[in-house]
Image (cartoon, helix red, strand yellow):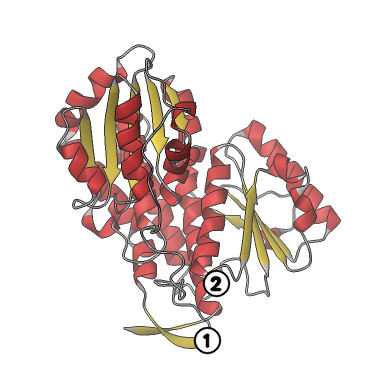
């Protein structure tokens, strides 16, 4: 099947299909969690009741950003000791994060479940922590994360719908479905299937509004670099958004991320007349004040090629042509809005990939970057 995109005929990609399928995948996964409610609770509730429990949200690459995005909100909402640590850090510096006497629940995210660091992190946690439990949230039934968790009485595996095992190079439906599922597990009072249908419907509206994905999302301008900014968990969204651009354009479009407040402390110097700046606006009125301050400052300085804010409501004091307002819906928390923001970021990365003449499903023609990371040597742990 072919279609017109950016003025030329292209073949529909797995990446595009996997972006479009996301709202349906989220609901399918949450409904699956509902069906397994008793079984999941039988494992999770006794673990969560352990005094002094430490919960580590972990993964490699995009999977690690799930913890960055939802970890701060989950910690505040549940009152639990929840932290996000990439497996790439756990493997190189395990004793910085794993304490022998502190009970730990390691929540591992993985599209394939076969990343060397993810498998090694599970083994190191078992080796170093006296009382360790595992929750594997993964998209691949045949992967090591899933298989190992299924074989352990101290672990539980939660499998996403099969189609979320993305065939494209970049993670799209896999990250968002694992993220929604984790929220539903730890905060079912807020992220219930019924309530999350509003998020899925709003994101479906966004996808529909972008048509055949040829309009450029943020305008068809000669961007040479893009900066994504967000506060709190939205900085995690900014980081993931920047990575999508780097991955799908094979680094041809340079991408950065930061918080709106942190951006002033040096990184703002990268802005020039070929730079696109995108600000993910917080739904919290206090945090939003800082987002608005930076937007106003950037507009006054007039250094960037384009400045775009994405928000649930328009910022009336700022130029209207630099704003994207989300489709109308009930008032969303930031942890719900992140799904909306990622729709725009994923589509932008896809269109920029095609504009650069790159095949989105296999952007790294040199083979130096792979869908499942290669070349990692896992060394046995040794004390100093």
Any mark on residue 312, and which?
Answer: none
Q: Provide the secondary structure element on which disc 1 rests.
A: loop
Q: Residue 140 in the image: x percent, y percent? A: 24, 52
- The answer to whether mark 2 and mark 1 are in CB contact below 8 A is no
Decide which of 134, 222 is in the foreground and name it.
134
Q: Disc 1 marks which residue?
A: 7
Looking at the picture, does residue 122 appear above or below residue 12?
above
Q: Please, which residue is most extreme toward the top here?
A: 51
Looking at the picture, does residue 336 appear above or below residue 134?
below
Q: Disc 2 marks which residue?
A: 352
Task: Give the residue at x 74% y 58%.
Answer: 319
Task: Give the residue at x 31% y 14%.
Answer: 50
Could you classify mark 1 by the number of other residues whose Cα lies within 10 Å: few (under 14), some (14-19), or many (20 or more)?
A: few
Q: Residue 335 in the image: x percent, y percent? A: 47, 39
Cα distance between the residues tagged 2 and 1: 13 Å
Could you classify mark 2 by the number of other residues whose Cα lies within 10 Å: few (under 14), some (14-19), or many (20 or more)?
A: many
Looking at the picture, does residue 127 appear above or below residue 29?
above
Marks 2, 1: nearer the viewer? 2
Q: Residue 106 in the image: x percent, y percent? A: 34, 31
Q: How many marks?
A: 2
* Mark closer to the chain start, 2 or 1: 1
The quadrant where residue 223 appears? bottom right
Q: Provide the secondary structure element on which disc 2 rests.
A: helix
Task: Give the residue at x 78% y 46%.
Answer: 266
Q: Please, which residue is most extreme toward the right here?
A: 301
Q: Quadrant of the N terminus?
A: bottom left
Q: Residue 264 in the image: x percent, y percent? A: 77, 44
């Amino acid at each position: 099947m072919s279609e017109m995109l950016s003025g030329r005929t292209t073949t529909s990609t797995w990446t595009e299909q996997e972006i479009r399928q996301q709202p349906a995948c989220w609901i399918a996964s949450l409904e699956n969690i509902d069906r397994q409610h008793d079984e999941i609770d039988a494992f999770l509730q006794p673990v969560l009741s352990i005094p002094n429990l430490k919960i580590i949200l972990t993964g490699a690459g995009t999977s690690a950003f799930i913890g960055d995005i939802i970890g701060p909100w989950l910690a505040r909402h549940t009152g639990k000791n929840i932290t996000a640590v990439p497996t790439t850090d756990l493997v190189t510096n395990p004793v910085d994060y794993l304490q022998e006497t502190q009970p730990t629940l390691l929540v591992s995210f993985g599209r394939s479940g076969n990343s060397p660091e993810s498998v090694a992190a599970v083994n190191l946690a078992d080796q170093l922590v006296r009382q360790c439990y595992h929750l594997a949230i993964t998209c691949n039934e045949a992967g090591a994360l899933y298989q190992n968790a299924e074989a352990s009485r101290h672990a539980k595996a939660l499998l996403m719908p099969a189609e979320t095992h993305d065939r494209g190079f970049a993670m799209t439906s896999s990250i968002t479905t694992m993220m929604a599922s984790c929220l539903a597990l730890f905060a079912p009072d807020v992220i219930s299937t019924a309530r999350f249908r509003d998020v899925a419907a709003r994101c479906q509206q966004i996808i529909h509004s972008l048509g055949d994905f040829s309009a450029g999302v943020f305008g068809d301008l000669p961007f040479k670099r893009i900066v994504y900014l967000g506060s709190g968990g939205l900085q995690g969204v900014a980081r993931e958004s920047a990575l999508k651009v780097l991955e799908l354009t094979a680094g041809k479009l340079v991408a950065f991320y930061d918080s709106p407040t942190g951006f002033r402390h040096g990184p703002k110097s990268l802005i020039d007349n070929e730079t696109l700046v995108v600000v993910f606006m917080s739904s919290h009125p206090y945090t939003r004040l800082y987002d608005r301050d930076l937007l106003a400052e950037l507009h006054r300085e007039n250094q960037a090629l384009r400045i775009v804010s994405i928000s649930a409501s328009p910022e009336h004091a700022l130029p209207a042509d630099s704003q994207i307002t989300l489709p109308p819906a009930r008032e969303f928390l930031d942890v719900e809005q992140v799904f909306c923001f990622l729709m725009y970021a994923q589509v932008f990365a896809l269109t920029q990939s095609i504009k650069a003449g790159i095949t989105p499903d296999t952007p790294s023609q040199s083979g130096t970057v792979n869908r499942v990371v290669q070349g990692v040597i896992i060394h046995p742990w040794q004390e100093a």
